[in-house]
Amino acid sequence: MNYHIGTMLIDEHFNASGECPLCKIKKTVEVRLTEQYLGEGVMEDNTRKEVNELGFCARHYDLLFSFPSKLGLALQISTRLKTVMKSVEKPEKAKQAKKIADKLDLSAKKCVVCKYLDDHMIRYYKTVAEVYYSKPSFRKRFAEERGFCLEHFAALNRYSDCAHSEQKSYLNDLYAVENRYLSALEKDLLSFCDHHDYRRRDLPLTEGERDCLKTARSAFYGSKR
């Protein structure tokens, strides 16, 4: 399962809005990848083989179930079930029971959508740095971003060498954006706490103070998907 990695989503979502742009890109990529397992590719041998081996995590099962094609999902899950049933054995001894448990635990941690989603996102992290390098007009937009969740801030750092000769400038802008974002959040959180003092209880909250816990959730864990 695959689709073309281009700059369209980067151009679309790096717009200084309130949400981490990589979170928005990830949401879009996730839906596109998941939908592919309900289309014509459902009956392809390679697709069925991957689903058979890896299955779906609970999140992506729920996402698949939210789409109209219940038959497509049933076909995929019936294939996966045959593999799972082979792991459901009757143990004769405690040692064998532990092996069965370990095998089932390992199986439960796999997901074919997660596998491809991670691969695609790595390519997006690299492409953001490459666009920064090749398009001077993008650098200003990048520097004006509101901020990134910690997961995607870390990822952008990890692949910063893809900015080539602009890596230092890229890292400087990346740090400046994130530091500004987290410093503003810290200020809003402290002010929010101060408003619970009886002497300030009647003072109005700013928008940032009112939303600071939601912002903190996004900063620490990314946007809800």
Image: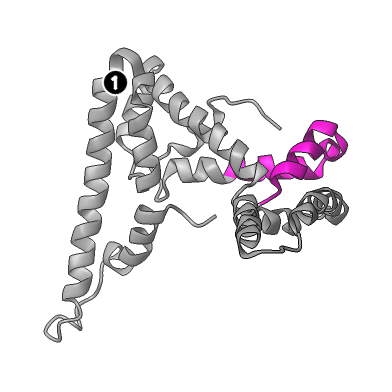
- Relative to the observer, which residue lies in front, 138 or 55? 55
Q: Position of residue 187 (x, y in %)?
A: 18, 60
Q: Pointer 1: what residue?
A: 167
> What residue lies at 31% left-to-right and 37% top-to-bottom?
144
Looking at the figure, which quarter contains the N terminus?
top right
Please tell me whether the stretch drawn in magenta is mainly helix, strand or loop.
Answer: helix
Residue 215, horizontal then vertical, whole percent: 35, 59
Locate residue 161 relative to residue 114 in the image: left or right.
left
Q: Is residue 46 magenta?
A: yes
> Can residue 136 be seen from the camera position used here?
no
Quick one: which residue is furthest to the bottom in this view? 198
Secondary structure under tag 1 reads helix
| Position of 61 relative to 28 (above/below) | below
Asked if one can make out residue 62 in the rendered structure from this viewpoint, the answer is yes
Q: Residue at x 60, y 39 (%)?
A: 115
The image quadrant of residue 216 is bottom left
Q: Position of residue 204 (x, y in %)?
A: 24, 75
184 inside magenta stretch = no
Could you tell whether 143 is left or right of 114 in the image?
Answer: left
Determine which quarter of the picture holds residue 89. Answer: bottom right
Residue 56 percent across, percent down from the top left: 68, 50
The span shown in magenta is 28-56
Residue at the far front: name it: 93
- Quadrant where the C terminus is found in the figure: bottom right
Question: Which residue is drawn at the image coordinates 31% and 64% (left, top)?
Answer: 212
- Amino acid type of disc 1? Gln
